[in-house]
Image (cartoon, helix red, strand yellow):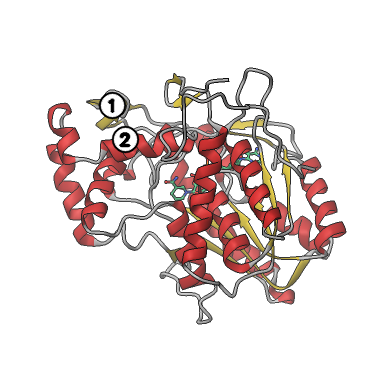
Amino acid sequence: MIIEPRMRGFICTTSHPDGCAQNVKNQIEYVKSKGAIEGAKKVLVIGASTGFGLASRITSAFGSNASTIGVFFEKPPSEGKTASPGWYNSAAFEKEAHEAGLYAKSINGDAFSNEVKKQTLDLIKSDLGQVDLIIYSLASPVRMHPTTGVLHRSVLKPIGGVFTNKTVDFHSGKVSEISIQPCNDEDIENTVAVMGGEDWSMWIEALKADNLLAPGATTVAYSYIGPSLTEAVYRKGTIGRAKDHLEATAFSITDSLADINGKAYVSVNKALVTQASSAIPVIPLYISLLYKIMKEEGIHEGCIEQIQRLYQDRLFSGAEVATDEKGRIRIDDLEMRPDVQEKVAKLWNEAVTENLSEISDLEGYRKDFYNLFGFDVEGIDYKAETDEMVNVSSIV
Ligand code: NAI
């Protein structure tokens, strides 16, 4: 079929297998160009098909020659209907990994469920024996709690008062004012249940109970802080509470791994265009301005550059892992540089529909958004007939 982008709100309902495959190849080439990383060799990535999780899987495989098991929740294709992009990304990743002689298998299902956890543990037992690195990179709007059966929905709301600020519709470039009503207590609990640390610790407990963690095993989850501009809706909002919980969980996991000398970290990453972040009001405007400044300064990074640097300079540099006063790895250091933030804040005050294409990198934002779905990728012939029925070769 000829596959074109079809938009519904903030989401693209189609994706292009060849464009997704090219994105994966580009990320692999980047990692290879940066040289070998003396990292973990048996790696489980939970949330492995897009964004930071995919970049982690690629960095482990092609930076450290690691065997990888990827867990994700993606929609396979059907005749005339494209798969979700993470499906095509994973198909491409596995093809490249297998061609390079690397072990790579995937599990497609709900990572919050007991069934998928058990399936993953069984696979590790039979194929890898143990894992030495577990990346936890889920971003989900919902979680069915495996014990209570309650379906929790996360929300992106401020706490304690209405939040009013600028936002942009990144398709039209129209800047407008948005007001978001504050949450109630239940919203906070639900968001913490979905995006907090409970599921992460459940994974680690289950792995440990079955003796599937190698001595000295490391686990890393991803967090975000961001500037004061977005604070009310992000770090001091419902999602921020979930991130507080996730960050606190790193300490309790580390305690629980003392006997095997294991360690849990949270890495605070940079704001980037992913399916998860494009749904958050205000963030696309911030990212468009941030991209402009960081590109001008020559310090812009995407997911793969962030994660490659996280592995090479922090996790596996050979030195003690550098953290901030709260024990977090800060790979958002360039985003949070005071000079960068000052410039973004100045542009934020000036931003209106009429000047946005000039003062921001809205074009870059849009391109990254289309790229997520395999569109607008260099070297792809979008007019050509394309087979949508792509398989992930070793899905379990
Ligand atoms: P993403 O939307 O690109 O990736 C989410 C991944 O989770 C995908 O592999 C998806 O298949 C998987 N997933 C979702 N629900 C699942 C389920 N029920 N079972 C199994 N897999 C499931 O998200 P992104 O942006 O890479 O986020 C990953 C982490 O990084 C999140 O914790 C996010 O808060 C954090 N982060 C994101 C930043 C950003 O700007 N995008 C910045 C800093 C941190």
What's the amino acid at mark 2?
Val
Query: Would you say 386 lies left or right of 229 here?
Result: right
**Element under disc 1:** strand
Left or right, 345 with reference to 86: left
Q: How many C-alpha atoms fall within 10 Å of the one at disc 2: few (<14), some, or many (≥20)? A: many
Q: Looking at the rendering, in which quadrant would you find the N terminus?
A: top right
- Residue 178's disc number: 1
Task: Name the residue located 66 percent from the left edge and 37 percent from the top edge.
Answer: 73
For the residue pair 137 and 229, the one nearer the viewer reads as 137
In this figure, which residue is indicated by the disc labeled 2?
Answer: 282
Would residue 45 be seen by someone viewing this image from the given angle?
yes
Query: Which circle's residue, 1 or 2, is located before the other in the chain?
Result: 1
* Tags 1 and 2 touching, CB below 8 Å: yes
Ligand 1 visible in quadrant: top right
Residue 74 sits in which quadrant? top right
Q: Name the residue: 49% across, 71% down.
A: 312
